[in-house]
Image (tube, rainbow, N blue to C red):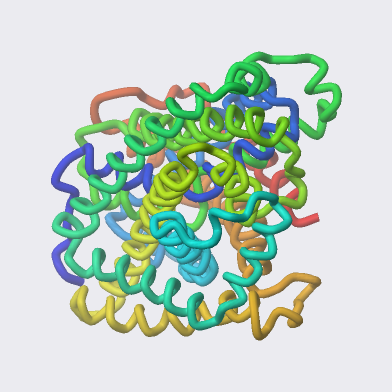
Amino acid sequence: MKQREKFSSRLGFILISAGCAIGLGNVYRFPIITGAYGGAFFVLIYLAFLLLLGLPVMCCELAVGRASQRSIASSFEVLEKPGQKWHLMKYVGVAGNYLLMMFYTCIAGWMLIYFFKYLTGSSILSLTTPEELGAHFGATVGNLPLQLLSTFATILFCFLICSLGLQKGVERITKWMMVALFILIITLAVYSCTLPGAAEGLKFYLVPSIDNIKNAGVITTITAAMGQSFFTLSVGIGSIAIFGSYIGKNRALPGEACTIVALDTSIALLSGLIIFPACFTYAGGVHADAATVGASFLFTTLSSIFNAMPAGRIIGALFFLFMIFAAFSTVIAVFENIMSFWLEMTNLSRRAIALINVALMLVLALPAVFSLNIWEEVLIFGKGFLDLEDFTVSNILLPLGSLMYVLFCTSRYGWGWEKFYAEVNTGSGIKLPKWLRFYMSYILPVIIIIVLIMSVF
């Protein structure tokens, strides 16, 4: 294996790791389920579970990556004891990363399409109702040549960045992308908070109400918050661990994990500052159903709101530019993980690996693209290919992989608590307290199993 690259700065590690965690779900999914499950109380419960679930699992991933100096393709082999089978986890990780990109690159391509629709002032601006925009969205994703072009552009651009190297490509580009992402979302949030219905929207979002949580159901609200806090960080398939392998031991990992989680959470919270004031100004409140809504929410309800605004074309273009940065930061991060698999297992150069994977990913993405048009009637377990791939990654592989990371780090039949504890606390900064051992060894695995069962059934 060739000499392993390192990040040029701590800032690069933080922003790229946060970029991997920050995805499209932060922007559309979080506000929707917040609206469906009672507003401010849901946010508080969500933040509590983020600390209980997301942070410990992220610490495990980062520790395994840094200690092994490998991706998930070989990290368990480096750390496991002779005769153990933890290395079989690599199949879950490698499959999870590819499967995630099989549908995620397709959805990222939609952001490109809609950005240009608003930028050029196309006929979409004349559509005013979610029903009209829903039909328009259906026609857009049903346009096979357009879908192939946008998906291919996403794959080609993001692998091109990865082919330039960790520092010259991934770190440099993602830094600028994340800075632009924060500037855009803060700008949009400030604008949205000046709308006529902003006060009512912000009250629903930020002021806890017993009535709201009673209407949503206490148990339902808690389970929804638990699920969202777990999945928002994309932990479990090694897409975070890889960045742990690129950093030194001068900083303790709990502090780094806290920073990444804080950045990820800030994007989710800021997205609410955009969506709730806009919904209460132009849509009479929040009407989305968290149980059924998907990414199409962006192209129907939100687009109808943009089209009703006086500066809708500009706001819509800026919003979808922000969505491009959110989507592409995740794609680049996961592609870098895939690149690392190949660098560890072959003697090929980054450019050769990128070329091979551009062709491979384009083929692998076809089922998701086709499921929206020519394979629309093809269903497996009642789901099209795109939805099935999404369900498999989000509801099965992420919690299963997270469970394996936690057990590996805390069990004497794995890497073991002592080695994990020494690695995670090496360096300056916030340390993992010893008293968390019982929680991470016995309680956290049970919670993850519950999440896994709930997610599947």
Identify whether 127 is placed above or below 95. Answer: above
Residue 90 seen anywhere in this rendered image of the structure: no
Residue 351: x %, y % from top left: 20, 77
Report whether 196 appears left or right of 39: left
Q: Nearer the viewer, residue 385 or 237?
A: 385
258 and 154: which is toward the camera = 154
Give residue 366's position: percent from left, percent from top.
53, 81
Residue at 75% from the left image edge and 38% from the top image edge: 287
Left or right: residue 429 compared with residue 20: left
Front position in the image: 412 or 61: 61
Left of 374 or right of it: where is 241?
left
> What percent of the width, then of the height, locates residue 156?
32, 73
For the point 79% across and 14% down, the residue is 210
Looking at the image, is 29 positioned above or below residue 48? below
**Residue at point 43%, 39% (across, down):** 59
Q: Which quadrant, please, contains the N terminus?
A: bottom left
Please indicate, yes or no, whether residue 5 appears anywhere in the rendered image. Answer: yes
Q: Position of residue 171 (x, y in %)?
A: 22, 51
Q: In which image quadrant can residue 393 be found?
A: bottom right
